């Protein structure tokens, strides 16, 4: 039988903090935090790895969220760099370089294949 007078001490949460300061360069660390900790607390606990977050946006599992968001166990806190080029602009520039004939559905048609396949 469980002792009714004893209170269960909640276990520490395990949070993964991921930062990418440059392309193809990812730093990852795991921190232990008490229940009720926020996203900002996780970034502070990550120490020098997350210290260079000027101009970066943070989130959990790919969703941008404020630093006041309360974390759950096994959350993945991520820091996102700003985009260097707008994806729409990059696509237009790529299309202009390739030309209209080398893009689209029929660009890589198999020899002897029907149109559209």
Image: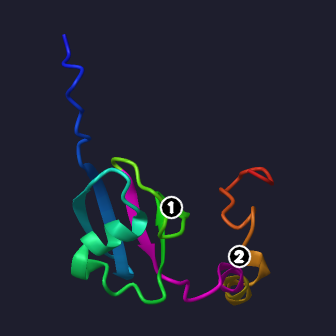
Please name the residue shown 70% across and 67% down the image: 107
Please count the marks in the image.
Answer: 2
Instruction: Note whether residue 84 is visible.
Output: yes
The x and y percentages for residue 63 are 54, 61
Q: Quadrant of residue 54?
A: bottom left
Left or right: 52, with 80 as reference point:
left
Instruction: Note whether residue 18 is visible.
Output: no
Please name the residue shown 68% across and 80% down the image: 91
Q: Is residue 60 above or below residue 19?
A: above
Instruction: Identify the residue position indicated by label 2 in the image.
Output: 102
The x and y percentages for residue 32 are 22, 56
- Give the magenta part as a residue range: 75-91
Q: Is residue 61 above or below residue 57?
A: above
Q: Nearer the viewer, residue 113 or 3?
A: 3
Please name the residue shown 38% across and 57% down the image: 76
Helix, strand or loop at label 1? It is loop
């Amino acid at each position: 039988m469980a002792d009714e007078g004893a209170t269960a001490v909640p276990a520490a949460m395990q949070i993964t903090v991921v930062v990418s300061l440059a392309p193809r360069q990812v730093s990852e660390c795991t921190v232990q935090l008490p229940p009720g900790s926020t996203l900002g607390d996780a970034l502070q606990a990550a120490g020098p790895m997350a210290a260079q977050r000027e101009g970066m946006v943070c989130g959990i599992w790919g969703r941008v969220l404020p630093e006041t968001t309360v974390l759950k166990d096994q959350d993945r806190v991520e820091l996102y760099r700003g985009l260097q080029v707008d994806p729409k602009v990059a696509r237009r520039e790529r299309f202009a370089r390739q030309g209209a004939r080398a893009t689209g559905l029929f660009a890589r048609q198999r020899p002897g294949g029907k149109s559209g396949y």
